[in-house]
Amino acid sequence: MPLNPDAIGKKIGPLTKDYTWKDVVLYALGVGAGFKELEYCYENNLKVIPSFSIGAVFEFLASVAMESNVNLAGILHAEQDIIFHNPIPPEGTLTTEGTITHIYDRGPDKGALVVAEAVTYYSNGKRLFTNIFTLFGRLDGGFGGEKPPSEKIEFPDRAPDHEERDLPTPDQPLIYRLSGDIFQLHVDPNFAKAAGFERPIMHGLCTHGFACRAVIRALFPGEPERMTRFKTRFSRPLYPGTPIKTQIWKLEEGKAVFRTVNDETGEIVIDQGIVEWMSREEMQKRLSRQGIRFDGRVAIVTGAGGGLGRVYALELAKRGAKVVVNDVGGARDGSGEGSMGPADKVVEEIKALGGEAVASYDSVATPEGGEAIVRRAVEAFGGVDILINNAGILRDRSFGKMGVDDWEEVIKVHLMGAYNVTRPAFLKMREKGYGRVVMTTSAAGLFGNFGQANYSAAKMGVVGLMNTLKLEGEKYGIKVNTVAPLAGTRLTEDVLPEDLFERLKPGYVAPMVLYLASEKFQETGMIFNAGMGHFSRVAVVQGPGVVVGDGSIVPTPEELQRSWESIDNLEGAEEYYNATVALGPMMEAVSGGGGGVGEVSGGLTVRGVFERMADAFQADKAGGVDVVFQYRISGPGGGDWYAVIKDGECEVREGLHERPTTTILMEEGDFLALMEGRLNAMSAYTSGKLKIEGDLMKSQLIEKLFKF
């Protein structure tokens, strides 16, 4: 069958591949690495040979051949160009997708070229490399297609600057094929003879790996992560056990050309090679931009003189943050005079690592203390971007023995402390349009724990605080989340069993807190457990419930008892983003699906609604109301209108208001259905048909203020 020109533009993938350090080492051994290049073969500080990027996408290459319908009896790998965007991690999951970009005709008896391009991403979304493959179909030319472009590298007229020699073993293909290319030509003597060879030949990509090692060895030894491009053309086959040498000409800093030759015959087996690499300085800059960094960010960590807080502060500083280390230095029950020592010691540790930090000794338990902590960040570093509310004390008693002081002191530090520091920090973040707040809750608060009524109440309280701050901070770029850590600290040293305490190192909690504090984390209002390397999400959910009675008479306890199985049922339970959305299912259930703004007759248009809106205004219900409702209705009959309600009057105009209180976004048909009473407002909101920006609570005034 002829080549398939319709394959041009054909999307291939996404294809995923999981790999471990053993796959990386197996590949390295397959392309000749050994004890002299232990960085490729030993899992301790393992580095990945960049050409591994080909071995990781064999499935894509096979798909290109199948989709293009190239004649497999005459297929050869002609060229390979790889662009490296980031260093390849030693293990993980790769996702590759791409397209067939060109099919070229070299003419009758001269074959055809199939070109495909694929981009590979790591599991964290980071782009690692782009492969540009060129397959040569020896038996597919002469179909009248586009001629390929002519590209040729002119090598310098001088001796190579470097010559790197290698000796593939006679058994080299047997190792290399275990990385994924199991084509019989490289292992089956009979198949090789049928294809015109004396015996199985080296994989072209195996020789390619030898050449990649050679240029790294010559130009930037031991630093494969500096490679940014590696392009080759495959010229002639090579038998295993044949010595090779890679000749390299350096053109300029960061660029060289090369070729690999058969050291016995002088035949070129890999030609037209281009290698590009970055300087060590540029590599360091790129590495500094990798992963989660806090360069330029200012962080406050309360209770940072030891335990979890100390670890958070150190890790933030290591990743570039300027840190305010807050700790009063008191006893774990909050008693005593306090001490500057714990905070000062952590500041010294950070500075010894080359970071920036200042100490704060103010108590989170008072509004003045909270203000002073934030002021310290502003005076020292110019602002605050990150707040980790970590400070805490314990005063455990059974509830019957818990005095008022025990209750109030714990509430003061945990719940009031979160308020006292978060409020001034929140205001600074709001001015800047960016912020990350991490609250600290506990399993005791989420689920309860004997003897910790005070602590449990405070820790559940910060969850409620988070739930509202996530809404109020959303339009200012402030994300507020909560961690429930399980770690061995001075607060839990004699609470937890000794063997368990040893396993609960604070460092196992820090990755979650740092992620929540980073700009890469874009969700808000989430709760996560963290401890011993185990992480999980916690959520408050609501069951579907049931309407008891007909709505005209209050149901009796006996009726609830008879319906208890349905009331108690959590199958199909959902979590809700805010209180308004959570009430939606109840409102929809009791209203039977209706309940719009009013009842209006047919022939209604969007413009007609707004022309009548001033007449529908209920002035007697508008006492003290000062709002601007902006409506943005999409669709051919939609448009933009706003209603200004102030001093008991309503003014409706077409267009956009500069500073609306609440913005309503709907599609034309849904908006008219809502106005006609055919669509319930709560149902519209929970289904996404009604979107509300700005002050969500003020939107609830609309039904009160207008009656059509």
Image: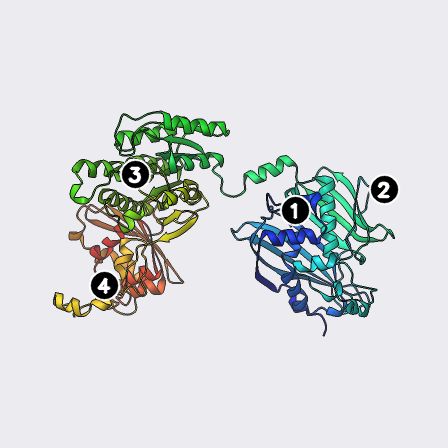
Going by the numbered disc 3, the residue's amino acid type is Ala
Q: How far apart are marks 2 and 4 (CA)?
A: 87 Å
Q: Distance between the residues labelled 1 and 4?
A: 72 Å
Residue 51 left/right relative to 331: right
Going by the numbered disc 2, the residue's amino acid type is Asp
Q: Say what secondary structure mark 3 lies in.
A: helix
Would you identify the image quadrant in which residue 193 lies?
Answer: bottom right
Residue 54 shows which numbered tag? none
First reached walking from the N terminus: tag 1 or tag 3: 1
Of 132 and 566, nearer the camera is 566
Name the residue at 54% across, 49% down.
126
Label 3 with label 2: CB-CB less than 8 Å: no
Label 2 with label 1: CB-CB less than 8 Å: no
Q: Name the residue under label 4.
A: 598
Q: Say what secondary structure mark 4 lies in.
A: loop
Q: Say what secondary structure mark 1 lies in.
A: helix
Q: Distance between the residues labelled 4 and 3?
A: 44 Å
Of 3 and 322, nearer the camera is 322
Q: How far apart are marks 3 and 2 (CA)?
A: 72 Å
First reached walking from the N terminus: tag 1 or tag 4: 1
Of 696 and 49, nearer the camera is 49
User: Which mark lies nearer to you, 4 or 3?
Assistant: 3
Going by the numbered disc 4, the residue's amino acid type is Gly
Q: Name the residue under label 2.
A: 157
Q: Name the residue under label 1.
A: 40
Which percent across, then down, holds residue 207? 75, 53
First reached walking from the N terminus: tag 3 or tag 2: 2
First reached walking from the N terminus: tag 2 or tag 1: 1
Which percent across, then down, holds residue 647? 20, 45
Name the residue at 35% across, 49% down.
527
Residue 655 in view here: yes
Above or below, comparing residue 128 to residue 616 in the picture: above
